[in-house]
Amino acid sequence: MNKRIYTVSPFTIVFALIMACMAFVSLKYNYILFIVELSAAIISLCAAIIVDRHFRKYVDSIVKKAFKNVHGFNEEYLDRFKLPVAVTGESDDIIWYNRYFKKQLGKGKNVTGSDITSFLGGVDLSLLADSDGTDIDYDGRSYTVFANHAGNGMVFYFVDCTYYKQLEKEYEDSRTSAAIIVIDSADDLINASEEETTRIVISIEDLLQRWAAMHNALYKRLAGGRYMIIFEEKEIVNMIATKFKILDEIRNIPLDGRTATISVGIGRGCKTLRESEQEARKALEMALGRGGDQVAVRTGESYEFFGGVAPGVEKRSKVRARVISTTLAKAIIDSDKVLIMGHRFSDLDCVGASIGIYGAVVKSFSKHAHIVIDKEKSMAKALVERYESEKGGDVFISPDEALKEVTPKTLLIILDTHSQSMVESEALYTKCSSVVVIDHHRKAVNYINNSIVFYHEPSASSASEMCTELLTYIGDNTVSKSEAEALMAGIMLDTKNFVIKTGVRTFEAAAYLRQKGADNVAVKKLFAGDIAIYREKAQVVSAAQIYKSCAIAEVEKEKKEIRLIAAQSADELLTLSGIKASFVIFVTDRSTVNISARSYGQINVQIVMEKLGGGGHQTMAAVQLSDTTVEKARELLIKALDETIGN
């Protein structure tokens, strides 16, 4: 029954009484008017009586069915029932309720005719009836609501569980999680004076102790320059909301030409403190693999990352590189053939590193080798064609051809990526049992974890730099002029001609390649583009808009060489005054939108792209969005920037 009909019935009765009074007043002046008004009053009164009787009959039918659903209890019993009970009609309107419902949820008011959903927080009634109870919050109290069908209506029982919900919340808030902290620049402190080292360590430990005290946490110094802090869950929630300001405080410690940073791993949501400590170690490993200066919070199998503003700390020791080169050499010797593969849409760094490793495999180990690449989609076609013309047409093969080459003893070397979803051919990776990974991008969650060698160095400028360093230990005659120029091109691409991400190892690698005959003029020619690409790039740059010191450009139409145009446009936008990061949004087909991101390090574009499902490096990252539009991609990008940068 429509609740609007019976809710106006009282007004109809009042109207009838008023009309009757007016009729008797009109009798003195006009008999006809008296008859009309009296008739209207009688009709209104009859209509109100009929509607009221119909409503009562309607309510009785539903309420009686409702009482049958509670095993024969009558209306008086339900009214004294110690739980709030309400009965609704076919329009979800309340037609009956007991005294406890009126007192607790109705606040003593008459709620007949009110929509029951106003007391349920918008819960779908069809789902509620089929469930074993639904938790809701109403007026500061927590209830578990049970519902049964009663003819055309429903019966609702409200169980007040506020006390137990508060206990549950107190338990969740007080659950402990372990945080393990390391100083990223600990290796640098070895080379500092004892007095300077002591001052830095004391400053960092003082901040960590005050951080722990501020959050009522247990602080403990561990062996090996590590620290552990035990936080309660409610404190972790607060720190996540403020994005772990401790990172900024550590970074602001005054040092002589250096920046102090820490990495933090937190194991959250574990059943025991022991499990939390183990998960915290995994989280810390992930934070360090992403370049440090950040907090990694591991909950189950997922991660949340905060910070990552400072550049990765360069590890000056070459011991690890020498050990890796020895292990790599053994893996090559034990194989019957070697396949070298990079990421999809390969660039100069990917191809340059591949050529460097290819030369070593063929010359130093005399092994059969191929570089696996999709030539049509590569952004380093000039380098591929040049090296192919010098060495022959069997150096580069397609992924389909590579699948036919795989044997049980084939070694697959993956370069410039450590993500399974980003490799040139996932099928090839799956088919090969022996895999080596060499990459410099900050660690992603879905990294390849079944490799026999995982050489990951986020502080390196490029994969070409890492491969050059390995080649210096493999053999002196490994690198020819052609390989040296290919490796140099890769380093120059990822460092923007030695402007960003350059460290001592970068220049040492460049000096080694120069010694092996790398000609900078010849390398520079590999970056040359035609006039058409230059014009397209100029249009993209000129149409860019500024948002929070970030340049955002859009290309809404599919264009030839659009990936190369987008990458170069993003680089070009960084040269503009006041720009801290650049983003170029472009389409590659009707339903796929890509974003190419660049920065000089002030904004970590890797974190921005990860919020959209992509990844990359602190200064160079990207994402591919399916089934979306350029406009929608821009909205998602701005939302990610707001979450990362703030106001």
Image (cartoon, rainbow, N blue to C red):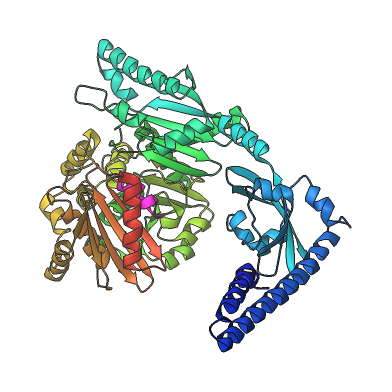
Residue extending furthest right? 72
Residue shown at 84% from the left, 51% from the top: 77
Is residue 222 visible in the rendered image? The answer is no
Above or below, 294 against 620 in this view is above
Q: Which of 500 and 55 lies nearest the eye of the viewer? A: 55
Residue 612 is covered by the magenta coloring: yes
Residue shown at 65% from the left, 55% from the top: 110
Side (left or right) of 637 relative to 327: left
Is residue 340 visible in the rendered image? The answer is yes
Residue extending furthest top? 195
Q: Which of 550 and 353 lies nearest the eye of the viewer? A: 550
Residue shown at 16% from the left, 41% from the top: 515
Image quarter of the C terminus: top left
Image quarter of the N terminus: bottom right
Residue 418 locus on image (x, y percent) = 41, 48
Residue extending furthest front? 28
Q: What stretch is highlighted in magenta?
A: 605-616
Which quadrant of the figure has residue 275? top right
Q: Which of 157 and 111 lies nearest the eye of the viewer? A: 111
Side (left or right) of 468 relative to 118: left
Above or below, 177 against 144 in this view is above
Above or below, 456 against 9 in this view is above
Residue 469 locus on image (x, y percent) = 29, 39
Residue 164 locus on image (x, y percent) = 67, 37
Q: Which of 356 and 500 lies nearest the eye of the viewer? A: 500
Residue 573 is covered by the magenta coloring: no
Q: How many marks?
A: 0
Residue 201 locus on image (x, y percent) = 33, 17
